[in-house]
Image (cartoon, helix red, strand yellow):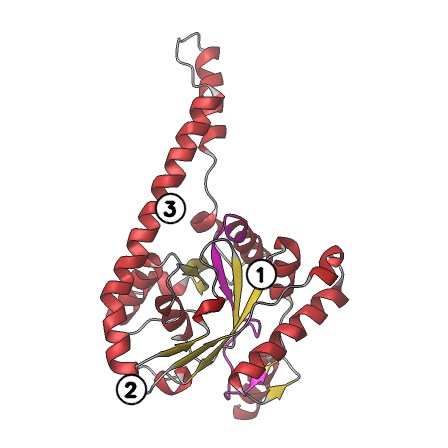
Amino acid sequence: MIGQAEAAKSSLEDITIVTKAQYNETAAARAVGRGTRTMVTTSQARLSLSSHRRTEVGSDRVQYQLSRVVAGPLLHLLWRPKVTGMEHIPATGGAILASNHLSIVDSIFLPLMLDRPLTFAAKSEYFTGTGVRQRLTGAYMRATKQLSVDRDSSRAAQDMLDAALALLRSGNLFGIYPEGTRSPDGRLYRGRTGVAWLALNSGLPVIPVAMVGTDRVLPPGSAVPHVHQVSIKIGKPLTFEAYQGDTAKGRARRAVTDEVIQAIQELSGQEYVPIYASVRKAQLNGDAS
């Protein structure tokens, strides 16, 4: 009924625009080598690529708005989501939305409540499931242009960040969960520094977001959604000009990440735990075994 989404890494195939200019130029060179009259100029190739991008962007927006029309009324009817701070989302240009992560439905409610498309990273399994619910999930992920993540890849995290940076520099919104995984108990855990890497390398603002009540809608391990009101609190944008020259320094990335987590906590009111959520999950699994 409602799908799943979780941040990690991107399949570059889904987010990297293939440079048709390079392809066409190579094809032209080969044609000349064969003595044919066919020639594709650089300017023609660039024009073709530009036209392709405009068509792709337009198609993406149509699909996104269609998903809002189809899913939006159902979300409002059953879960009555309340959004505050919408004025902090820029009308144009790139920005990073950093949210706490309570449930797999966080990546459904937040994008569909915004007026602009928002891209999250999602596990590749969510795109390829064969069951009814998995197929609905995959259809939603594709309609809203979520990034497919192969978490078995050794370069998964960096590939996701590189893909996200490209999206941000193209003027898009990108959503990230600094905790790196869902909270196992509703508390807020130490942030991973990927959000800081994006902020410092893009120079774009980070907008803190608090999801409230989504863990009551679909708790970890639950397959059937429950009816419970959802609140989304959007905070003021954070900028980090003071750290701008320290993009490669771990201390700067840690300071930025901690500031983002603090801003999320102020919105959510969650108890903060100074360890990674993945470590706590491992501890819980160890206790269970």
| Residue shown at 38% from the left, 75% from the top | 105
Kindly identify which numbered label has been placed on residue 57: 3
**Which of the two marks, 2 or 1, is nearer to us in this view?**
2
Q: Magenta region: which residues?
A: 167-188
Q: Amino acid at mark 1?
A: Ala
SS under mark 3: helix
Q: Is 184 covered by the magenta stretch? A: yes
Q: CA distance from mark 3 to mark 2?
A: 35 Å
Kindly identify which numbered label has been placed on residue 198: none
Classified by dominant secondary structure, the portion drawn in magenta counts as loop
**Which of the two marks, 3 or 2, is nearer to us in this view?**
3
Q: Earlier in the sequence, mark 2 or mark 1?
A: 1
Q: Is residue 184 above or below residue 85?
A: below
Check if mark 3's residue and mark 2's residue have beta carbons within 8 Å. no
Q: Position of residue 213 (x, y in %)?
A: 41, 85
Judging depth in this view, the residue of 267 and 176 nearest the camera is 267
Dot 2 corresponds to which residue? 227
Q: CA distance from mark 2 to mark 1?
A: 34 Å
Report if residue 220 is visible in the image. Answer: no
Judging depth in this view, the residue of 276 and 143 nearest the camera is 143
Q: Position of residue 282 (x, y in %)?
A: 58, 83
Kindly identify which numbered label has been placed on residue 157: 1
Q: Amino acid at mark 3?
A: Val
SS under mark 1: helix
**Which of the two marks, 3 or 1, is nearer to us in this view?**
3
Asked whether, in this view, residue 205 is left or right of residue 246, the answer is left
Q: Amino acid at mark 2?
A: Val
Mark 2 neighbour density, 10 Å: few (under 14) some (14–19) many (20 or more): some
Q: Is residue 41 above or below residue 182?
A: above
SS under mark 2: loop
Report if residue 124 is visible in the image. Answer: yes
